[in-house]
Image (cartoon, rainbow, N blue to C red):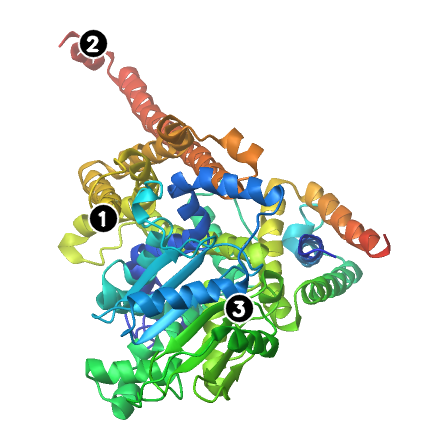
Amino acid sequence: MTLWQSSLQALALSIGGMTALAFAMDRHYAQLRPLDEVPAAHRTALRVLGAMLLLAVCLPAMRGWSATVGSVLVLGFWSLGALATVVGLWVSARYLVLAATVAVLAVVASCFW
Amino acid sequence: MQPAKKQSGAGKGSFRQAQAWLHTWCGLWFSWLLYAVFLTGTLAVFEEPITHWMTPEHHAHERAEARQAGTVPQAQASLSQRLQWGMAYMERQHPGADMWELWPADSKGGGDLRVYWFDREGQYAAAQLDPKSGSVMDASEAPKVRQTLGGHHFVDFHYQLHAGQLGLWIVGIAALAMLVALVSGVITHRRIFKDFFTFRARKGQRSWLDMHNAVAVLTLPFQFMIAYTGIAISCSTFMPAGIAAYFGSSAEALKSFQVALNEPGKPQRSGQAMSVPDLESFVLRGQALIGQPVRAVVIDYPGDAAARIGVYGWNDADDLSKRLSPTSGMAMFSAATAELQQLRLPGGVDGGAAALTQSVIGGLHMATYGGLLLKWLYFICGLAGSAMMATGAILFMVKRRAKHQGEFGASTSMVYRMIEAANVAAIAGLGIACVGFLWANRLLPVELALRSRWELAVFFALWMLALMHALLRSPSMAWRDQMAALAVLCLLLPVLSFVTTGDHLAAYLRDGDWESAGVEIFSLAVGVAAAAAWAWMRRAENLKSVRKQKPAETSQNLAVAVDPGAVRKESLS
């Protein structure tokens, strides 16, 4: 696997994770559905999903580079993913969900391909 | 009696209020300098591509080399032959030098053959030998290359402002202030997690605050790391007491410290003559020990019995990207006995854990690991850091435009005016100065004496002009003028380059010259962003004047309704 592939995977997972964490918040969930509060089950599921995806960023980062460099890069990819999520929420919350879902599915597909 | 709820000033109010005060003022007074340091530091990530773009005379040579590399490989002198030529030159030309350094070949065994030595003044001197014959290459035969600092200007500026030790101290203090501003900012930011992903556009002051918070909080690990490592790299300058206690503080003492730090175990001259042995066997042993092809062979005290021979390796780019410490391998031998005196494997250091930490801190700051992708990550986070300083400085004035806070008594309006001007010159003006530096590279005659200094002079002159302009024009007009200037300079840079050198973006892309293409594409992107900012400011200004006009018209209509004669009298007069 090339470094470019590892980076794309790490970035996609980071965007997916940050997006899930964002929609676990009332303010951003309301951008998708006309509700004042995120239903408790949704909130928990989104938080768990977000945390897992963010942890999963470690895999391509450490496999692509090394444990030491990868652990530093993880922080960078999280920052990049969070910035992309802020921009996505500003442009269109629905497109952000679509883009993040496609990105994470592409990462999953690339693991089997 | 309860203390007044709203208090401001150092040490006043609650802990959070005191931190807010610290964040505001520590941030503001250093924001202009920190913005300049951050923006130039961000550009310095791509020092090599910028230098490449700024030396177009090299482009044809590099293209020819690439073509040659793609065709039949040329007959090349062996490593042994190159070492012999290098030694023969040094023995003939510089027998009394304290140090000889031979760079026999690139990592593939080809490329240039270079030699270095310390001259009589103790300065580093160099010569290039023909790798086909071993004869000295005449510098006058080489194509005339424009003298330029290239991308190194941004490197030098971002850590010492082209002002040597004084500049280093100034930047160090600013970096310390940045750490203070970051910590106090985190404490001040009450809703750091609730507002984590929040950006509310078109909400005036709120939008600026959201933007400031977003770029700062989301890249916080990077901002902390880069400020801390920036200070730690220069710890021997900022914390000289330990060195002074052990080595003294004279120039000679500092030299001893450098030797102890960088060349541990370096012997003294013995005074007994001994010719330098054949280098090939040392090089072959060194290569085997460090597992890298030879980059340099360094001979300390050549011609003396205490001479030692150091073999340094070429770092493999792929290997380098996977470790935080960027050091290459090194094997040091005694010239007299061929005994191995010191061995450093790639990524290792000579001085234990503290030295390794220092090396890693240096690597973290200078992005020597991780490869090209990491450089892009640093570039984006660096831009976010620059945006953090810029939005903070702008936010300070946006708040006060809406509500005068009278912090400076009778002089408040004047100080606010100065801060507005400093904001314009520091943010837009620095952009103009940076792109102006690239324009100067293309416009100044190649033969001009002290050309690189003239390029620097253009950079600083443009920046000063931007400050004067910002002081003379109203803030809103100054922002618009300077954004327009930045847009024009950035958008026309590729055109200027084409007119003056004949190189253009399409050719760069066709030839796979991504370094030059990257510089021009980034310039175009900044130009488009500056033009968009100019258009946004113009629209906002027009809207403001329409809003101002409307109440005036309303009050005039009201006056007509109350006293129609008054308006008639006004129009007749």
Label 1: few (<14), some or many (≥20) within 10 Å? Answer: few
Q: Is residue B33 above or below residue B57?
A: below
Whole-percent x, y for residue B559 in the image: 26, 20
Kind of residue at disc 1: Arg
Residue appearing at x 70%, y 41% in the figure: A95
Q: Secondary structure at mark 2?
A: helix
B215 left or right of B161 in image: right
The x and y percentages for residue A67 are 66, 72
- Residue at the (30%, 57%) spot, across then down: B33
Whether label 1 touches label 2, CB < 8 Å: no
Q: Earlier in the sequence, mark 1 or mark 3?
A: 3
- The answer to which of B227 and B252 lies nearer the viewer is B252
Q: Quadrant of the N terminus of chain B?
A: bottom left
| Extreme residue in the top direction | B572
One can see residue B563 in this view: yes
Is residue B185 in view?
no
Image coords of residue B334 (percent x, y): 45, 86
Q: Residue at x 16, y 11 (%)?
A: B569
The type of residue carrying mark 3 is Val
Mark linked to residue B310: none
Which kind of residue does numbered mark 2 sit on? Arg
Mark 2 vs mark 3, CA separation in Å:
94 Å
Chain assignment, label 3: B
Task: Point out which mark residue B453 bears.
Answer: 1
B368 left or right, relative to B552: right
Read off the residue under disc 2. Answer: B568
- What percent of the width, then of the height, locates residue A4? 67, 52
Residue at image mark 3: B294
Residue at left offset 43%, top offset 48%: B208
Q: Secondary structure at mark 3?
A: strand
